[in-house]
Amino acid sequence: MRRRAGEKKINHLKPTVVVVSHDASETGAPILALNICQELSKNANIIIILPRGGALLKEFLKNSSCVLRPRLGVIFSSLLRREFKRLPGEKLPEYAIVNSVVSAGCIQPLRALGIPTTTLIHEFSAYIRPIGILDNVAKWSNRVVFSSPLTRDDILSSCPQFNNASIKVLPQGPCKRPGNSNQAKLKNKKIDDAWNFLENLDSNSILILAAGAIQPRKGVDLFIAVADELRKKCKHMPLQFAWIGSGYDPVHDFNVSLWVEDQIHRSGLNGELRILDHSSAYNRLMNRADIFLVTSRLDPLPNVAIDAMLAGKPMLCFEKACGMANLLLEDPILGNALVASYLNTSSMAEKAANLVNGYEQRQLIAKRSKEKAQEWFNMSHYIKELKSIAEETVKEEKILKEEFKILASKRIIDQEFCFKNSKLSKRSEILHYLVSWRNEVWPRKPFPGFHPGIYKEQILEDAPCPDPLIHYLKENQPKGEWNVPMITPASSLQQQDSETTIALHVHVHYPELLDTILNALNYNKIRPDLFLSCTNHENHSEIQCKSAGANCTLKSIITTPNRGRDIGPLLTEIGKELDTKYEIYGHLHTKKSALLPGKQGCSWRDFLISNLVGMQDIAMADRIVTALKKNPKLGLVFADDPTCVGWSGNRKHADILANKLNLGPLPRCFDFPVGTMFWAKKGALTELYNLNLGWEDYPQEPLGYDGTILHAIERLLPIIAAKQGFTYNLTNVPGVNR
């Protein structure tokens, strides 16, 4: 870790705050981070973490006590701890503000040291890669602050795990841009195209301005298209167009600049549209402009748009593409005048033409824009709110530390079940457990049979604090729906009688995996009638040959359309027969989970087969059948998955089905057979079969990981059984996990 001393000395009487910026370039997010540093440094010592450098490095040093530069850009909590020990009294910073998803790698190391973290998100999910990074942001951040409703809604839609995170929408204030001294201006006037452009601009010209880096997301091509249409609509007006921003290099940049230059030329705009490099003339250009355009394809809350409105310029943008549109649409006058249809250059050109041709209207919109901008964008208010949020996180972190001590002393978490061969230290495991439940991002059960989410929903009414397991322990582990009876290798085993009718449906999409199921079945004494389905008739002979080794009666092999995955064949073809003719039946399938990385699919399959069928010396299917026979109310048995999966992107489909099945209000937290493998008793799922779902009700392949009627059915199975008066049990085979 490289450390550079800043210009501000550590004041022992002030708190210390960490600000993280992914780099020091003269772009939107780093400029905002710098402004945050400038404001917070008035009352706090500032430590800046800067994975990459840039033109603003000197400004960051000027406004901080030190700048930490991780070598190779990688952050480790041990390195941070060593640096923080240099602080007076070796006292850790009070809190951290992490600016941008690009800085996400710093969040977990900071939290591991007990430093509460507020993360500012300005990005859209479309250009966050890998998208899984958002899991860590949602899990490890004490608070997540979005700059606009547009970005919040986009992230929530694409990443349902954010639904339970502590989030807030807070538009940033106007950012001061460094390096605008008179001396710099005078020097640049001689060599800077932007200054030369200003000096040569006719005083009667109507200047249409845009700003931003030359990249596809900023929509430079759309700006040129609008300019072309606007020129044609206002033929007799002295229009001039300018775009100011870094990165324009048509000689060497074949990705964007070359095509921008060509578009300007072919549009006949060479004499009317200029691309100007980043310059200290920016403020002067903004003040000179008559209209400002934001043609970005996706832009949360651009600083340049805030600058334009505060300068009293009509600022046009595209709906659904720019966070400013949400604010403008709150005001009917501004919304009608300034918000164009999504990426519709004709719509924007039409609205701009109305302003060009109507001087009085342009002045009215300019005045109203400035008034609203002063109301919406206030840096002092922004910083005050950020500090208030951060202070809340400091209080919550103290609670979490107390909860940590309790779990560390109780040793109640089943390490193997909860963390599966984790290489984390015991301390890290407990911290992972607590933070995952705080924001409910892929949380896991602490031990088999207990669902903290159900306890939290029913007892704590979804309050963020305290942790549900902590409350459960303090209340002496009360019984309730959050506790589910377990079937394990130690469960009772009865002599199987020939009078009990048992069937097993296996959907064999991958014939090469059928042996895994049938071999596991041979560890049991039950010999269910086999109902097999597949999606390719050519596989019948192979499937029939493999099934002969199971010493079971093969009732049928049917070919079904490749729709509905494994549950479709059960519901549409086989389920009613099983539910009518058999007292107990199982549903399994040759699972691959090709969308999961590495060996996770194999691990998941082995976990389900071991739990629901068995393994050497462990006859789980026999024990499941014994439990179903002994308990008349037991209607469903499935594996106890350690991950507490919720509705994710499936709630809409679930609500539709729940309405058809008269299931009433659906719970937020629940157990279900993750992977859609289970054993059922006659009558438990009758209502589901009576829906008479056809092949046309299932989506066509290929399917995504989530968000279909199939995933909704999977989650509804125990709720459907409960509606018929049945309960469910869970299985657990110690040492087998995923």
Image (spheres, rainbow, N blue to C red):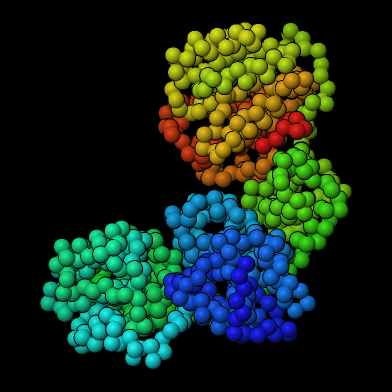
Q: Is residue 242 left or right of residue 592?
A: left
Name the residue: 39% across, 92% down. Answer: 182
Quadrant occupied by the C terminus: top right
- The picture places residue 591, in percent across and down from the top left corner, at 57, 28
Question: In the image, is residue 506 above or below residue 244?
Answer: above
Q: Is residue 383 left or right of residue 643?
A: left
Residue 529 in which image quadrant: top right
| Image: 686 above or below 28 | above
* Residue projecting furthest to the left: 236
Residue at 79 percent across and 21 percent down: it is 630
What residue is at 78 percent from the left and 62 percent from the top? 401
Instruction: Give the x, y percent position of residue 641.
Output: 68, 37
Query: Can the viewer see residue 137 in this picture?
Result: yes
Instruction: Give left or right: position of 519 versus 354.
Output: right
- Depth check, front residue: 481 or 498: 498
Image location (x, y in percent) of residue 610: 69, 26
How many numbered marks appear? 0
Q: Is residue 465 above or below residue 486?
A: below
Q: Nearer the viewer, residue 656 or 196?
A: 196
Residue at the spot x=77%, y=9% of the render? Answer: 497
- Residue 97: in sight, yes or no? no
Q: Quadrant of the N terminus?
A: bottom right
Which of the 4 image quadrants contains residue 494? Answer: top right
Image quadrant where residue 403 sits: bottom right
* Residue 259 place in picture, x, y as percent: 24, 60
Would you say 153 lies left or right of 417 here? left
